[in-house]
Amino acid sequence: MIDVIIAGSGPTGLMLACELRLHGVRVLVLEKETEPTTHSRAQGLHARSVEMMDQRGLLERFLPLGQQFAVGGFFAGIDKPWPDRLDTAHSYVLAIPQVITERLLTEHATELGAEIRRGCELVGLSQDEHGVTVELASGGTPADEGVAGGGGRQLRSRYLVGCDGGRSTVRRLLGVGFPGEPSRVETLLGEMEVAVPQETLAAVVAEVRKTHLRFGAMPLGDGVYRVIVPTEGVAEDRTVPPTLEEFKQRLRVFAGTDFGAHSPRWLSRFGDATRLAERYRTGRVLLAGDAAHIHPPTGGQGLNLGIQDAFNLGWKLAAEVGGWAPEGLLDSYHTERHPVAADVLDNTRAQMLLLSPEPGPRSVRRLVSELMDFEEVNRYLIEKITAIGVRYDFGEGHELLGRRMRDVGLKRGRLYELMHGGRGLLLDQTGRLSVAGWADRVDHVVDVSEELDVPAVLLRPDGHVAWVGEDQQDLLSRLPKWFGAAAG
């Protein structure tokens, strides 16, 4: 039997596959599309996602293919300096197209032994106390585990994770509620060539953006631009892409010219709907990424939020499959990540309001801009957008408890270099502690860091601090909460 089936081969599903394979979990990724997408809706990795790639030894693959930017404007496009005291060794945004992110994660997942099957559409599921049965549409790729049934094929796995996007089939089949707010405004987004000089285009865009902040055109090279322009209303079916003529008509409304737009690479539309799944787990089926939450793309948080879901879920699901998960560990995925998504929905709602051309929101925008001149406010909002400010509720204790640990220099290297295997880690500056009984799940590293002013920290596989101190008995009381019972 397959251990885990993942529906969807976007960044969330691929990151989850990588995390599971680090623990030897047998993973099958099902993707209904026959070929990888050729266009990128998302364009970058925020600091927390960059940290995750570093923690798994992947960052060296990403850095040469992206550009590092430490510039303002990520909160509602309000142009303020990049904060100079962010709590991260990666204080930048890595601009890298989604198609490259997916390609690199696909390569890594495959190297680790994950199986990815394209042209396989999930159309049905059922579960019992022992596993999940997945039904594929007729014509799905045959498999050794598959049996004929329902006109298609059936696969059996111990767990299923829906990473299949905002219109998730897995979520619908589960009957999980997806409450929230429908789209009130809609925006066209696409990549195309134009027939005017870049200087002319830039001057017109700058003028239009004085009053309409959801308008823009970003050069991508080779005469291609990423163009964004508001629509007049909300389409009944946003799965139907706009036409080039619709794009040009809206450009003329706002700019007085369509810039001679031609040769579109791709065209799409998006709204400002915000919805959050009522629960992330139903028995042996879980949801992650856009299948669990949708929101406007303001701040560039969508892809990052999904990757971070996968990073939280992967080791917990692997522990469940491996038989060593303590009670409640898998449920903590919902407990920890659901509030994070709710906060992202809130900040994207706020940002959309601040982008409105109406007088009231514009006055609020001016006030927020003034507040962001205070360095602490600016830093707080950027930490929220980049997710380095996330703190899970682990109860009372040291201020580091529940936070992810930044990369710190050690006497013999860097902290993140020790986390490539996805295991727990005790960083012990005292040399007096022990993880005997958990050595198969937790690495014990005796080293010192000038950047760390606590005796020792216990890190979960996702890098969040589970314990701080120097007392062995206190440590022994904390290890079972996250890593199960000691080995006999």
Image (cartoon, rainbow, N blue to C red):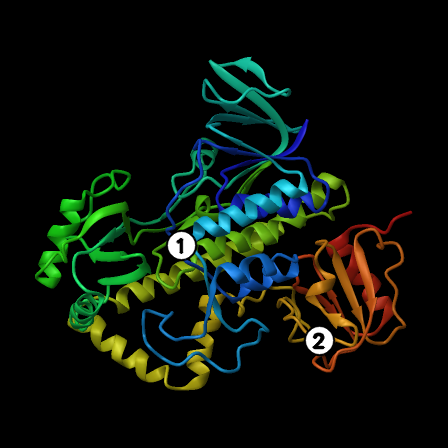
- Residue occupying image coordinates x 65% and y 57%: 56
Q: Which mark is residue 42?
A: 1
Q: Position of residue 334 (x, y in %)?
A: 56, 50
Q: Quadrant of residue 36?
A: top left
The earlier-in-sequence mark between 2 and 1 is: 1
Residue 272 screen position, x and y as percent = 29, 54
Q: Label 1, secondary structure: give it.
A: loop
Left or right, residue 276 beside residue 141? left
Horizontal side of 346 relative to 134 (left or right) equals: left
In this view, the residue in front, 375 or 286, is: 375
Q: What residue sits 71% from the left and 75% below the top? A: 409
- The amino acid type found where label 2 is placed reads Gly
User: Which label belongs to residue 163?
Assistant: none
Quadrant housing the N terminus? top right
Say above or below: 128 vs 332: above
Amino acid type, residue under disc 1 in the picture = Ala
Q: CA distance from mark 2 to mark 1?
A: 32 Å
Q: Position of residue 49 (x, y in %)?
A: 54, 60
Vertically, is 166 above or below 210?
above
